[in-house]
Structure formats: C-alpha cells, structure tokens
Image (tube, helix red, strand yellow):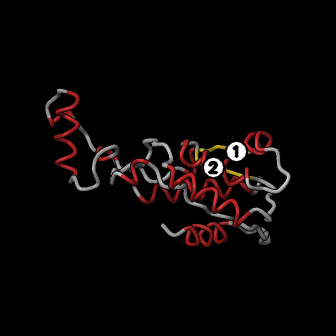
Amino acid sequence: IPFIEVVEGLSEMSSEAPVTVQLYLVRHGETVANRDNILQGHCDYPLTELGTAQAVQRGILLKDDKWGLVFSSDLLRAYNTTKIILAEQDGADPETLAASIKETVLLRELSFGVREGLSRALTVEEAKAEVARIRNVPVSQVHDRPESLASVKERQVEFLTRLKY
C-alpha cells in the first residue's frame, strides 16, 4: 500500500486543522534473505555487508537533517539500519542516538504467512509441503495465515494516529 494513500486516508478521518509533519521513510539495507531470495516478512535476518554500506550511505545523505523523533520497526534489520544512519549525524553520540530510537511493531512489513523464511520461488502449496516436512507433520496441519493489505494499512494508520499524541 503506498504510504501516501495511508496519509491521505488519515487526513480524511480528522476534523482538526492539518499539522505539517516531515516524514523520512527509509527501507532497511540488504539482508541475507534479500540476497538469498528468501521471503522474510516478520522473520528477521541480519544485514549483509552491502546492507550495512547502504545504511552508511543513506546516513551520509541525511547527516545534516535533524529529527525530533526517530521510529523503527522492532525487527533488527530495520533497527540496525536506523542506528547506522543516525551514527552518521555530525557530532552525535551514537549510543545516545540509538537509545532515542522508538521501536514499534506497527512499522513491520507485510507477513507472508507460511512462505516466510523460504525461497521466494515456492508457491503456497510448495511452502506448506516444505514446512510439513521440516516439522514432520501432515500438510493438512500446516496453515497459511498471511497478513492482508488491509491489516498492514490499519497498522500504518494506527502509527500515524499515534504521532498526533
């Protein structure tokens, strides 16, 4: 869901005068799962060397910007990317900046259900069979519960609503 669509939807929900907020939306650096073509969703994978370098580069590009609040998904790939970006701030103490990061599950990416942690190439049925094999259970006992786009949008709207308070 495009983030701007969520922001526009939020403004339609409020009767208050608009408030100007500047948001920086930054995707985490490359992870082992990205590199290896694995769906990660809510599974957590570490940044690769390239992912760390990407975060450093983004930090250099944003080093002169000052933020009142810094939020990150609670997943380590996002948190570590945020921490690396903040470390590039001129004259900033990296530990103080890291402590200022507010982690939230509301910024997690879409959950891909049974396919998480497996190859992107697998269909849902193939993923169920693989999970059944790993768990040594019948395929009928493996249930796919991916997150809906509506649920992701609800989380995004909740996050933006909480920014107001």
SS state under label 1 = strand
Where's residue 100, x and y in %? 76, 44
Tell me if mark 2 has few (under 14), some (14-19) or many (20+) residues whose alpha carbon lies within 10 angstroms of its own.
many
The residue type indicated by label 2 comes to: Ser
Please tell me which residue is depicted at 25% across the width and 40% down the height of the picture. 143
- Look at the picture and state if 4 lies above or below 118: below
Amino acid carrying label 1: it is Lys
Q: In the image, what residue occupies the spot 62% across and 68% down?
A: 7
Q: State the residue position of label 1.
A: 102
Whether residue 92 sits left or right of residue 46 in the image: it is right
* Residue 15 in the image, given as x and y percentages of width and height: 73, 69
In the picture provided, is 82 more to the left or to the right than 63? left
> Residue farthest to the top?
136
Q: Which residue is mark 2?
A: 72
Q: Are marks 1 and 2 in contact (CB under 8 Å)?
A: yes
Q: Determine which of the numbered discs, if any, sits on residue 144 in the image.
A: none
| In-front residue for pair 78/10 | 78
